[in-house]
Amino acid sequence: MASSRHPLRRTVAAAVALLALATSAACGTDAAAGGRQTTELRYQGSVGQVTLPELAADLGYLGDVKLKWIGNVTGGPQDIQATATGQSDFGGAFNGAIVKLAAANAPITAVVSYYGSDAQTFQGYYVLNDSPIRSPRDLIGKKVGMNTLGAHAEAVLKTWLVKGGLSAAEIAKVELVALPPVNIEQSLRQQQIDVAVLGGVIRDKAVANGGIRTVFTDYELLGAFSGGSYVFRDDFIKRNPQTVKAFVTGVGKAIEWARTQPRETVVGRLESIIAKRGRNEDPSLVRYWKSTGVAGKGGVISDREFATWIDWLADAGELKGGKPKPSDLYTNEFNPFASGGGA
């Protein structure tokens, strides 16, 4: 199990260093000769789960654009670093991680929301039923397991701790532990960690297994919001605007398809996608699917979804110089739902 106090600062620095080496090579790989726009997008997936682009492709919403799976990822910061350095064409992460990477001069832009929290789908902070942990102060000296450091789970946790009156020195005594998502529930039950951050279908499966209770959730703390976005490199967008538009439109349509279909229909489609792609995965997780959690129609991004984390990072001393404006970090230019279209 990996533990760190300042993971985001180090991972962003590494990504920016790699970016300098990769930019020249990446520039020539995403557009065909003669100025034609690429119709293939390299991406990273998630074990036992179906991403919105994968759902969009299966529904036929991406048109001529094809997806090329290059492997799986366990955390958003690594996913968008791969995009920034040209290893993949798009990636998704918590909006705060996007703020941090963009503030470190990585030329990326968010184009569509892909996950969030609502009354059905959220990230919860769970303990065993007999745990004494109930308030922020109870976490001092305890271990909290989450899928990746420096992202959504850490930001929400520290926001809760600050609101609970903990000082910076006291918050530093809460140990954060990075674990593969599929192992977090087991680590809690084996008491290797004191608190487990669980979201989506992984959370629902853990709750169904019994023996755990909620301390708090991001939905209780912040209300309904979109928490993460897909990003492209700026140079990719410049050379392939129609490809990006097809991607954003398709993802937006997939969000609305999932929002309007019976739950059983969505789950059946997700199971079918996992079976067809042949990656030797357990499909049981998607049977707990409830919603995407995306707040905006068709994944339209709002200022609030970046402003919240810009302020948090600035208060934590993670942003050097002036705070970026939300509008500098994302665009709804390619999303037909932003102007009432896309149906």
Image (cartoon, rainbow, N blue to C red):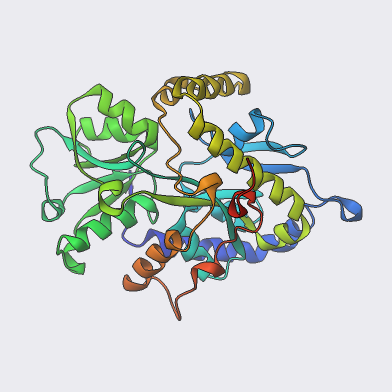
149, above or below 10, in the image = above
User: Residue drawn 74% across and 61% down?
Assistant: 238
Q: In what quadrant of the picture does the N terminus appear?
A: top left
Of all residues, the one furthest to the front in this rendering is 340
User: Residue drawn 89% across and 52% down?
Assistant: 33
The answer to whether residue 324 is left or right of residue 146 is: right
Q: Which of 68 and 221 is in front in this view?
A: 221
Q: In what quadrant of the picture does the C terminus appear?
A: top right
The answer to whether residue 276 is left or right of residue 255 is: right
Q: Position of residue 216 (x, y in %)?
A: 21, 45
133, above or below 28, in the image = above
User: Residue drawn 11% across and 45% down?
Assistant: 133
Q: Nearer the viewer, residue 42 or 58?
A: 58
39, above or below 213, in the image = below
Q: Where is residue 272 in the image (x, y as percent from the top left)?
A: 57, 19
Q: Where is residue 342 in the image (x, y as percent from the top left)?
A: 64, 44
The answer to whether residue 286 is left or right of residue 255 is: left
Of all residues, the one furthest to the right in this rendering is 34
276, above or below 6, in the image = above
